[in-house]
Image (tube, rainbow, N blue to C red):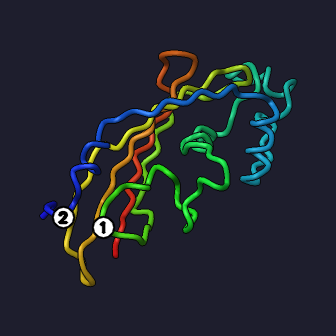
Amino acid sequence: MNDDIPDAAFKLIGVEKRREYLVTKKDIRRFAQAIGDPNPLYYDEEYAKGTRFKSIVAPPLFGQAFGFEDVPPEQLQLDGSPIEAAIPIPARKLVGGGSVFENFIRFKPGDKIIVQSKITDIYTKQGKRGRLYFIVHETCFYKQMNELAAREVTTFIKRR
């Protein structure tokens, strides 16, 4: 059933991309504001010192903001979908097929986030209106060099 997926698409499976970011207090505050979470743990240092974290920490899904590659506007796909979904398969329309996000360690100001992402699978299924192409994408978020802080597995679905 995968016979119309080009070899070029299958060759992308397992190819890792790596990016690094430095977490700042401003990043954490702006993320908390963007999601509408007023918890003082995300911006009040005095309050945060009295918690089990002992300092400001990022909200649980903070790492997700760094999950997709940061590209200039001219490199964005026409439909606005992430560059990670630009797989050479015979389908154009893209929809999110689901995401599982696991959070293990909270990020703090000064942490280095290392993001490693890769496609782990590409397969097809027959839908009511034609063939559907599934792209499974895994992203791991490491704190400093080797502490796994979070992991996300996302499925993109493409159709003609």
Where residue 70 appears, as percent x and y from the top left, is 62, 43
Q: Amino acid at mark 2?
A: Asp
Alpha carbon distance from label 1 to label 2:
8 Å
Q: Is residue 68 left or right of residue 134?
A: right
Q: Nearer the viewer, residue 107 or 68?
A: 68
Residue at horizontal 36%, vertical 67%? 158
- How crowded pointer 2 is (Cα within 10 Å; few <14, some 14-19, many 20+) is rated as few
Which corner quadrant holds the C terminus?
bottom left
If you read the primary sequence from the N terminus, does the residue marked by circle 1 or circle 2 appear first? Answer: 2
Picture quarter with the N terminus: bottom left
Label 1's element?
loop
The residue lying furthest to the bottom in this view is 129
Residue 28 position within the rendered picture, expressed as x and y whole percent measured from the top left: 75, 36
Residue contact at pointers 1 and 2, CB within 8 angstroms: yes
- Mark 1, residue position: 90
Q: Secondary structure at mark 2?
A: loop
Q: Residue at x 75, y 49 (%)?
A: 37
Disc 2: which residue? 4
Judged left or right of residue 147, residue 159 is left
Question: x and y percent of residue 59 in the render?
Answer: 66, 39
Compared with 148, 96 (above or below) is below
Residue 21 at x, y percent in the picture: 64, 28
Q: Residue flagged by tag 1: what amino acid is it? A: Pro
Above or below, 65 relative to 36: above
Q: Is residue 39 above or below residue 136?
A: above
Q: Is residue 8 left or right of residue 98?
A: left
